[in-house]
Image (spheres, rainbow, N blue to C red):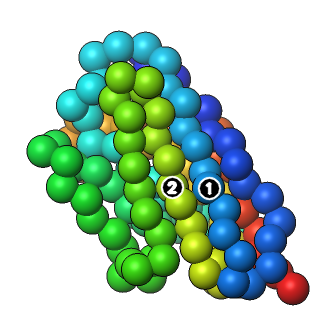
Amino acid sequence: QVQVVESGGGLVQPGASLRLSCAASGSGFDHYIAGWYRQAPGSQREWVARIMRGDTIEYSDSVKGRFSISRDVARKMLWLQMDSLKPEDTAVYYCNYRRTLKTPGYWGQGTQVTVSS
């Protein structure tokens, strides 16, 4: 069983930066796909960034060039550095570990990010 806990969200002004953290516990997921997702009010959960097997990194078009995902397998940590934040980045951000893109994997409770002036 894998458990994940996100942290680092908050209220920031447009243009600011935040760094989200995801601490995982358990075993057997070192080679899982590790990713960040977000869900804004009234919207479906969407993919933001992920580290695939082989350490290929992918970003959604909406965050490319502004967000950076990183991972420390030994420490079971995943981070999302978010720069140049925009109001449309406001959402609950979730960490996810999954074996394949077709399996649900493990989710945390999420951390709220609000970008507002």
Residue found 27% across the figure and 26% down from its top: 30
Query: Is 48 situated above or below 116?
Result: above
Residue 59 place in picture, x, y as percent: 34, 69
Residue 71 is left or right of residue 117, and the answer is left
Q: Residues within 10 Å of mark 1 (few under 14, many from 20)?
A: some
Q: Is residue 3 left or right of residue 17?
A: left
SS at circle 1: strand
Three-letter amino acid code at the position of disc 2? Leu
The quadrant of the image that shows the C terminus is: bottom right
Task: Tell me the residue that label 2 is attached to.
Answer: 80
Is any atom of residue 99 visible in this view? yes
Examine the rendered structure and indicate whether residue 24 appears above or below residue 70.
above
Q: Amino acid at mark 1?
A: Arg
State which tag comes first along the sequence, 1 or 2: 1
Residue at 19 percent across and 48 percent down: it is: 55
Q: Position of residue 54 (x, y in %)?
A: 12, 45
Residue appearing at x 44%, y 24% in the figure: 75
Of residues 83 and 24, the one drawn nearer to the viewer in this rendering: 83
Q: What residue is drawn where x is 83% and y is 66%?
A: 11
Question: Is residue 68 positioned above or below 70 on the image?
Answer: below
Q: Which residue is mark 1?
A: 19
